[in-house]
Amino acid sequence: MPGRHRPGLFGSRRLRAPLLAGAAAALIGVTAFAVRTVTAEAEGCGTGNSVRLTVAAAPAVTPAIQDVAARWSATRPQVAGECIRIEISPVEPAVVASRLAVRDGATLDVAASPVPTPREDDIPAVWIPDSISWVTRVLTVDRDVFDGDTPSVAMSPVVLAMNEPAARALVPPGQRLPLTRLGAALTAKHPPLKLVVADPRRDAASLAGAMVLRDVVVVGKADLPKLVGVYRTVGHGIPDQATLLKAFGDPKAAAPLSEQAVLAYDRGNPDTALTAVPLDPPAPAVDYPYAKVAGKSRAVSRAADLFRQALLAPANRGVFASYGFRLPDGSVAPGFPGGHGAIADRVATMRISDATKVSDVIGVWTAANTPSRVLALLDVTSSMTGFLRTAKGPRTRLDVERGAATGGLRMFTDDSRVGLWRFAGGIGGAKDWREAVPIRPLTRAQRAALDTAVARSTAAYTNSFDLYATVLDAYRSMRDGYVPGMSNTIVVFTDGRDDKPGAPSIDEVMTSLEKMVDVTRPVRVVVLGIGPDVDLTGLRQIAKATGGNAFQVDNPDEISQIFLAALLRVS
């Protein structure tokens, strides 16, 4: 962005030759094999008379990028008479994404604590992650962070990796596995496979697998609880791809991996080789986009353009093929190893580019596998005795509220912490709220206490209350008791509006809220407005200021699904 300060790459040791190709190098990205930063520089291209081009690449594709860089540097590329000195580092995409977000004063959920504020050398001029999904996610933080388009330099379809005996038992060699058969295999009384998925917030192939599972499990929003259960089962204790690979000690294990990762794994001569089983319809592919970071000097930007041309040049296609990558269009170049389920036929090249679906999948996964700290606020004013028409006949608003609250409790993991307040005018003496159940870990006893408190919630005699002040008190309490590593959330159920005489205006409330907000202790407010009389104007402002939202529930039969969608952050 013009006039904006942008940093350059990861300070690390530079060598004068690219990493030698071979079986060990091919395992990069799927094992703990260490790779050093490589500088491919033309002879005589020193630091004083050169343009420094820094590239951060996903570890799996780094050896291929380094080989192309070595060839390119041998041609002595120049910008305005100065030679180009290129430095390539293997960096996990989650690390670069986090650095880019933190630099812009925000965070991305990459299943890790935000990185420290990056230095000048912590931001590359070019970023080649394993999926366009990373680019899309970073763009939600800063839409001007990249310059120009982001073409793929290579691709690899995401497949279901299995031990060869298990694969032969499930699907004939050379055939695709229909998603219907996959769903049946996962839900069978004696499943023929054990599916495991690494955290999709950190691994693109696992994100593609989680998206496939969503398509298998979710027909409508009523299926969201089922998806939560599936995500908990397949993702328990699998933080990353390195951990996931250990699961193949189980002969029934199956996991979403890129085709290239399967070929690299088998090149290491394991006791039992893996087979790449393609899905029908196919899963999205990992596509290695070339993203040029904006704000660099004109010379660096021009050098980045020239290197992109080199990576996409027909003469270098065989380099990527030798490491098990396909061309961006899904075809293969000479030197592609093949075997182990990988065929030379052209394959589908769908990218992980649906930003809404990515957000939904990550939201459900996070809720399913991350403990939450939740405070529920139940409206018990007299208007809650009013009736609403439902498919099962008239029900009071209070009954609808009770059902949604009880159902929502089942969505939280056992290591979550949940508490409950009731609110109505004067219910707490000087306050219009009263604590019914303190926030505690969701043991069996705590769940029982919450169920009982919800069931015994009865309407007060008044319909007047200071709703905004109650929400502010809840926010202050949750912020002060903030627990890192948890989703700290306030859920407000109400059918009314802030109408107590002398209560602060929404402008006064927003001013107070702005003073309380602490970006290091984020607390999200979610509001469920029940019935036609609720006024969400002010509540929506409060919710959005905290990263939450307010939902109008016109159809009581849908409140449970709307509540779950709100908690799971799906659209």
Image: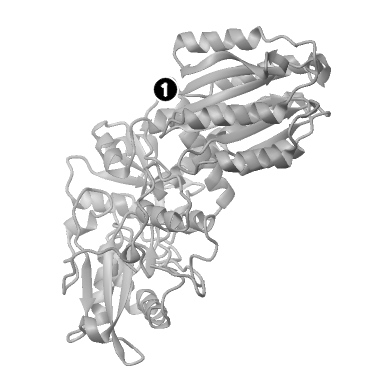
Q: Could one spot residue 335 in this view of the protein? A: no
Q: Residue type at mark 1?
A: Asp
What's the image's color scheme? one colour
- Where 303 falls versus 263 (above or below)? below
> For residue 61, what is the image quadrant?
bottom left
Q: Nearer the viewer, residue 57 or 293?
A: 293
Packing grade of label 1 (10 A; few <14, some 14-19, many >=20) is some
Image position of 390 (left or right of 164): right
The percent coordinates of residue 254 (x first, y second) are: 35, 37
Please give the name of the residue rendered at 49% of the width and 38% of the height, measured from the top-left corner. Answer: 213
Q: Nearer the viewer, residue 116 or 204?
A: 116
How many labels sit on residues? 1
**Against 444, is 484 above or below?**
below
Q: Determine which quarter of the picture holds residue 541.
A: top right
Residue under label 1: 415
Q: Residue at x 42, y 68 (%)?
A: 6
**Can you name the residue that lies furthest to the bottom here?**
81
